[in-house]
Image (cartoon, rainbow, N blue to C red):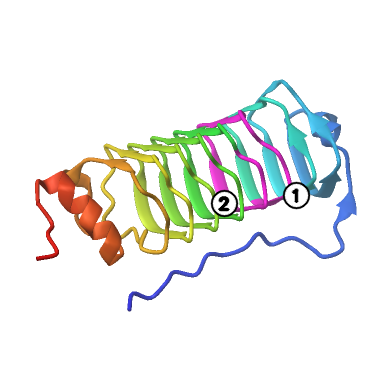
Amino acid sequence: MKKKSKIERPVVSAKIGQGRFNDIYSEEELYLADVMIENEVIGPETLTNLELTRVVFKHVVFEEVVFDKADWTDVSFEHCDLSNSKITNASLHRVSFQECKLIGIEISESNWIHVSMNECIGNFSNIVESRLKLVKFSETLMNNASFYDNELLHVEMERCELEDASFIEMPMSGLDISTCSFEKINVAKEQLAGCTVAPHQAIEFSKLMGLIVTNE
């Protein structure tokens, strides 16, 4: 059995204090560290070069916020709504999303290292031209999601829903989707080499290769 990689969780003090998101404007540059933000509604707005370090967001709604050139380290989103937001040209290091709504979110041209999505709703999300290293999607809805031209290294998908998800221009070698559920996903047969699937999934993928499966 393939050994699973250890995904590091955000490192945040248990004694973190309360803060307000508008505190990002208290410095010359957009910066926030060592605070918990709760029960706020943020946006719509575009935030460029926002640096977050050891920050926890709980029950925060981001209304179509664009994060450009973000730099986030040790950041936790819990029960937040980032639907239809955009994260571009970003660096995400030890970032977790727990029970968040991520419907239609777009994350592009970004570096993910030690990132986890657990029990989230990420239907219709777009993950584009990004580098994902040590990333785990767990019990997350990714129906109709689009993964385009990403580089994957030690990425796990565990018990996710992937109905009609698309994996385009992206080799799936090393990716294990055997515990995920779907009747149809969109992927070119050339991208499947090295992907781990369950026996019933293999029957569906065999159709991409022109095989006819019979019970006789």
Indicate left or right for 38 with 171 as reference.
Answer: right
Residue lying at 10% horizontally and 52% vertically, measured from the top left: 212
Residue lying at 55% horizontally and 58% vertically, measured from the top left: 139
Mark 2, Cα crowd under 10 Å, few <14 / some 14-19 / many 20+, is many
Residue 145 in the image, given as x and y percentages of width and height? 45, 38
Indicate left or right for 84 with 40 as reference.
Answer: left
Query: At label 2, which amino acid type do we have?
Result: His
Residue lying at 27% horizontally and 41% vertically, measured from the top left: 187
Residue 197 in the image, given as x and y percentages of width and height? 29, 61
Residue corresponding to mark 1:
55
When the figure is inspected, residue 77 is found, relative to residue 70, above or below; the finding is below
Q: Please name whichever residue, 168 or 3, is drawn nearer the observer in this view of the structure.
A: 168
Residue corresponding to mark 2:
93
Residue sitting at the far front = 216
User: Which quadrant: the C terminus?
Assistant: bottom left
Residue 121 is one of the magenta-drawn residues: no
Q: Earlier in the sequence, mark 2 or mark 1?
A: 1
Residue sitting at the far top = 45
When the figure is inspected, residue 200 is found, relative to residue 152, above or below; the finding is below
Question: Is residue 27 visible in this depiction of the protein?
Answer: no
Task: Compute the Cα span from label 2 to label 1.
Answer: 12 Å
Asked whether the beta carbons under mark 2 and mark 1 sit within 8 Å of each other, the answer is: no
Residue lying at 85% horizontally and 35% vertically, measured from the top left: 23
What's the mark number on residue 35? Answer: none
Query: At label 1, which amino acid type do we have?
Result: Val
- The part of the chain drawn in magenta is 74-102
Residue 179 in the image, given as x and y percentages of width and height? 41, 64
Tell me the quarter of the picture where residue 43 sits.
Answer: top right
